[in-house]
Amino acid sequence: MKDCSFLNHFITENIYLIDQGTKTHEQPAASSGPLIVAPLPLSDKDKKFLYKVFTAVDVAPDMLDLRGPETEFKDGHSKVFFFGTKPTTESTDFYKEMNLQDCTIVIAHSLSEIAGDSTKKRELWSVLKACFP
């Protein structure tokens, strides 16, 4: 986390948050970030690993849309990552960018399996760097 303590030297006025009852204070729409499809519920260890991996490619945890394997992913997501499950397409290549309609799909092993295997971590990291240049 960044140290922002120096800001009190630049901003000397009182700052107030005015809630006007609008939806502008809600989190960003789920479709603006990647869709993560994985068997739910995720363990705390798997969530921590998932957040760490995506933070490394500058995707904040609150931008991730986390859903179960029964999810239809045709709702505006441009990137969909399958962890420990596969889409209903015929392709099953792990750690490869696949394009389906207007969507990039990546299939990976389960989060706990990736966390315990350095080869799978490298493969995931390579595809994430390609997806989020």
Image (cartoon, helix red, strand yellow):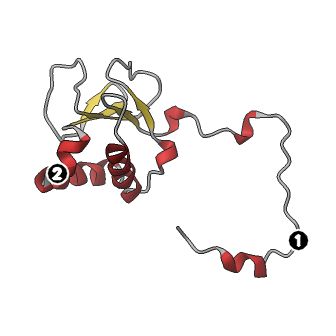
Gap between marks 2 and 1 measured at Cα: 50 Å
The amino acid sitting under disc 2 is Gly
- In the rendered structure, the answer to whether residue 115 lies left or right of residue 38 reads left
- Across and down, in percent, residue 77 comes to 44, 31
The image shows residue 35, relative to residue 60, as above or below, that is above
| Label 1 crowd (10 A; few <14 / some 14-19 / many >=20) | few
Between 60 and 133, the residue placed more toward the observer is: 60
Residue on which the image places disc 1? 13
The amino acid sitting under disc 1 is Glu
Q: Residue 94 carries which label?
A: none
- Across and down, in percent, residue 127 comes to 24, 48
Of the residues tagged 2 and 1, which is closer to the observer?
Answer: 2
The image shows residue 2, relative to residue 131, as above or below, that is below
Give the mark nearer the N terminus: 2 vs 1: 1
Between 97 and 30, the residue placed more toward the observer is: 30
Q: Residue 116 carries which label?
A: 2
The image shows residue 79, relative to residue 133, as above or below, that is above
- Across and down, in percent, residue 8 comes to 76, 77
- In the rendered structure, the answer to whether residue 112 lies left or right of residue 19 reads left
